[in-house]
Amino acid sequence: MSEEQFQTRGRRLFDTTINVQSAVGAFAGAAAACALGYFTLVSRVEKLEGKDIVHEDRMSRIEVGMREQRSETNQQLREIKDGQKEQSEKIDKLRDLMIQNSPMGRQDMRRWVK
C-alpha cells in the first residue's frame, strides 16, 4: 500500500474493516442473547401453563359447586311443593269437616237453626 492510500483510508468517517475477534465476539454475544431470551420465554410459558392448570381446576370446582347447588335447590323446591300439597289436602279435609259439621249440614240441627 502506498502512503497516500493509507492516509485516505485513515481519514474515512466509518471504518469498514472487519476484525475477526470482534465478529466472533458479536456472534457469540448474539447467540447468548438469543439463548437467554429463549429460556426466559420458555420459563414464562411454563408459568402461564401452571397458572392455566390451576385456573381450570378452580373453575371446574366452581362448576361442580354450582351443579350441586342447583340440584339441592331443585330438591328443596320439590320438598316445598310436596309440603304445600299435604297442607292443601289438610285444609280441604278441614273445610269438608267444617261443612259437614255446620248446623245446615246436619239433619237433626236444621230445625233448630231455623
Image: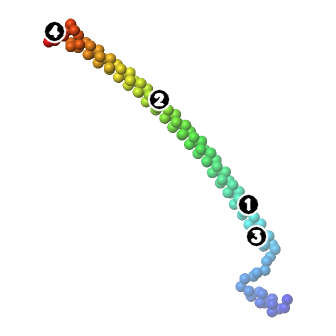
N-terminal of the pair, mark 3 or mark 1, is: 3
The kind of residue on which mark 2 rests is Gln
Q: Which residue is mark 3?
A: 26
C-alpha span from label 2 to label 1? 60 Å
Residue 9 location (% of width, % of height): 78, 87
Badge 2 is on which residue? 75
Give the SS element for disc 2: helix
Residue at image position (49%, 35%) is 70
Q: Residue at x 64, y 47 (%)?
A: 50
* Residue 35: assigned label: 1
Which image quadrant: the N terminus?
Answer: bottom right
Q: Indicate which disc, 3 or 4, sits on the residue closer to the N terminus.
A: 3
Q: Quadrant of residue 55?
A: top right
Q: Secondary structure at mark 1?
A: helix
| Marks 3/1: CA–CA distance | 14 Å
Nearer to us: label 2 or label 4? 4
Do residues under tags 2 and 1 come within 8 Å of each other at their CB atoms?
Answer: no
Q: CA distance from mark 1 to mark 4?
A: 111 Å
